[in-house]
Amino acid sequence: MNVRFCGFGGQGIVMAGYITGSAAVRDGKKATQTQSYGSESRGGACKSDVAISEEEIYELESEEVDLLVAMSQQAYERYIKTLRKGGILAFDEDLVTPKKTAHKLYKIKATDLAHKKFGREIVANMIMLGYITSISGFVSKDSMIQTILDNVPKGTEKMNEDAFELGHRLGSKVK
Amino acid sequence: MGLREDYLKKFEGKTYFWLGDEACAYGGVFGGCNFFTGYPITPASEVAEVISGELPNVGGYHVQMEDEIASIAALIGGVWAGARGMTATSGPGFSLMQENIGYAIMTETPCVIVDVQRSGPSTGQATKPAQGDVMQARWGTHGDHNIIALAPNSVQECFDLMIRCFNLSEEYRTPVILLMDGEIGHLRERITVPSLKSIKLKKRKKGKKKDLLFGGELIPPFKEIGDGHYLHVTGSTHKENGIRDVESQKVHEKLVTRLYDKIEKNREKLVDLEEKWMDDAKIAVISYGAAARPTEGAVALLRKKRKKIGFMRLRTIWPFPREQVRALGKKVKKIYVPEMNLGQLSREIERFVDCPVVGIPKIGGIVHTIREITTAMERS
């Protein structure tokens, strides 16, 4: 299972990849996470790939992914061609306008919800993580939550967990 | 139990999802490092970031210097004062360190230099990986010399080889290079920290008053500053007692040949490689570091299609395992070499084999895919 998170720097794209890969390891699976970013600390194109497998992972740069999570139009346009036929595209519907392609489309207003419900756009990645955990089931919900709690700044655990749960609920409704 | 053991116990046997850089830093700490000097540079900064947080917990010191020249200079000074030290950098910083790497070789200073290779030359693609420093690691500093360089291909190996780097640096009293690449440095994967008991640390062999600091035996014991010895340490050619003598041809020849030989004569002990599917192989593929991952995947895939292809991965790059490669060249009809440069190790392999050597180079900051390797192998 190959997942690619993409967007711009500052959206927590690398963090989302880290949480996912780390949770998969917690599930007892093999996982790798790689990242690529520009020299800018904010705003540059950014992607983070996670591979999850029961076996050795040899491929470090996936040519094709099973799930593409797009958080910006620029990143969507750059990476949509790497999504395999029939693969899942999960995207922030306020930030990405997808073209008609042979993929399963899942949209969510992650950034808008983060702003309205939590007053913090930064938790959009957690909403998205909850959402894709629910629609894809490739990592257990328990491992994801545990990993989030272990890795977010102290004092923000509840907000991040609530954001994850919100995404998860919305995901289970569209399944 | 000391402060160090007390603190490190909490990591024993635990599984983490670490970056290669992070594993390298912990490998250093578990390898006995108590002194780190450095200057931040992508993609090596995380080594400094992690070790700067951890060294104070084990009674060690982290010093951020003003640049890479100062970093390795301070490292060498610290080791002479008794530290077990390391630095970490990437291509541009590694270039700046070259002169003092020569100084460390000439003064027989045990230390570890991590080079997390990135795409060059110059600033190149600063945030992207490469394997372009293979020859810089071997020949970057001027003059005749020998060097030890190890190349990890997984996060676990960043940890494990770091410990070996420290042990080799003490055993051979010489700088040792961990030749990582940005792909592995910035890769996260599962790693299990071994128990402290299972890690054997090579202690520094300390010289007594009568021991010669730079001679008497192939690898003389080390005398630290502050132990009451009269020391003279210089990068200029020196006699066995350390006193400078730049006129005598014989003194220079004896010194530099010994420095060369202490690695050359132990080549077989230093060689470390992995072989797979070689028994019936008619064709071999040799790789190292990040490129070895998709390479192994490509060979595994071709084996499933009943192709008689074997896989060799070098963990020790320098000294080069020439006898093993020479033997392989007699056994197989062709050798492919995928690497993230325009052909640095493939040229070295060519020197020792008669069969054709076909490089599978890739530059531009992205590691090979399995398909790229199998396609290249089908083409030629």
Image (spheres, grey):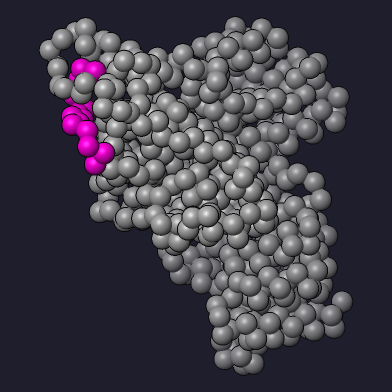
The total of numbered circles placed on residues is: 0
Judge whether B238 appears above or below B180 on screen: above
As for residue B374 lying within the magenta part, the answer is no
- Could you tell me which residue is drawn at 37 percent across and 49 percent down? B35
Residue B253 vertical position relative to residue A51 in the rendered view, above or below: above
Q: What residue appears at the point 56 percent right and 45 percent down from the top-left corner?
A: B159
Q: Is residue B254 left or right of residue B118?
A: left
On the image, which quarter does residue B8 sit in?
Answer: bottom right
Q: Decide if residue A1 is on the left or right side of residue B190.
A: right
Q: Specify whether B7 is left or right of A3.
A: left
Which residue does the image show at 46% across and 53% down from the upper left?
A: B47
Q: Nearer the viewer, residue B280 or B251?
A: B251
Q: Residue A37: x percent and y percent?
A: 51, 59
Residue at 60 percent across and 71 percent down: it is A151
> Is B121 rendered above or below residue B58?
above
Q: Foreground: B35 or B125? A: B35
Q: How far across and down, in percent of the image, does residue A109 sit?
A: 68, 83
Q: Is residue B229 magenta?
A: yes
Q: Toward which corner of the image does residue B301 lie, by quadrant?
A: top right
**Is residue B130 in sight in this rendering?**
no
The main secondary structure of the magenta stretch is: loop
| Image coordinates for residue B180, horizontal then vertical, percent | 51, 40
Residue B224 in sight in this render: yes
Q: Quadrant of residue B91 in the image? A: top left
Point out residue B238 in the picture as x, y percentages from the top left corner: 20, 20
Q: A70 or B107, which lies in front?
A: B107
Quarter holding the C terminus of chain B?
top right
Residue numbers of the magenta segment: B225-240
Q: Is residue A106 left or right of residue B139?
A: right
